[in-house]
Image: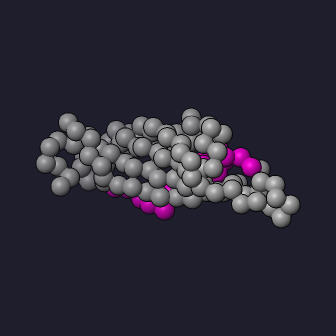
Amino acid sequence: MPLKRMVMELGMGTDIRGQDYTKAATRAVHNALRQNSLVVADAFGVPREEMVVDIIIGVAEPDKVDKQAVADMLPYGRGEVRVERGGMDTPKDDGSRGTIMANAALIVYLDLPDGAGQ
């Protein structure tokens, strides 16, 4: 059966003092997850654990994000993490790096028979 795109959840996270890109990214995923209550899997009779979730993170320095830590934020489903240049670093008054801001998009797919979910 083909994967069908069902839902997109969006979130934003920060690390105000620690300059930790992974912390900001996991907070962005947490923000996206906590703003929604997905019943789409239940509505189609698919176990939640079978959801496929593309997690796209935007931060200023993508190579500083621990992808496994981000994937571990999902309460169920199979997550794949992609980190891209985005987000924003807000400098302190002295010009040093201050607040790290991350954006997250979680795109949820279900494996449904043709014609379902339309």
The residue positioned 57% from the left and 59% from the top of the image is 12
Q: Quadrant of residue 94?
A: bottom right
Point out the image quarter for the C terminus: bottom left
| Residue 6 location (% of width, % of height) | 30, 52
**In front: 38, or 10?**
10
- Residue 17: within the magenta? no
Point out the image quarter for the N terminus: top left
Residue 68 as seen in the image, left or right of residue 109? right
Q: Quadrant of residue 63?
A: top right
**In front: 60, or 113?**
60
> Farthest residue in the bottom direction?
93
| Residue 40 location (% of width, % of height) | 31, 54
The residue positioned 14% from the left and 43% from the top of the image is 114
**In front: 87, or 104?**
87
In the picture shown, does residue 96 fall above or below 81?
Answer: below
| Residue 34 location (% of width, % of height) | 51, 58
- Residue 36: within the magenta? yes
The residue positioned 39% from the left and 55% from the top of the image is 8
In the picture shown, does residue 3 fall above or below 86?
Answer: above
| Residue 32 location (% of width, % of height) | 50, 57
What residue span does the magenta drawing correspond to?
Answer: 19-39
Q: Is residue 73 visible?
A: no
Q: Is residue 114 visible?
A: yes
Q: Main secondary structure of the magenta part?
A: helix
Residue 60 as seen in the image, left or right of residue 2? right
Report the coloring of the rendering.
Answer: one colour
Residue 89 as seen in the image, left or right of residue 31? right
The residue positioned 48% from the left and 47% from the top of the image is 56
Residue 84 as seen in the image, left or right of residue 77? right
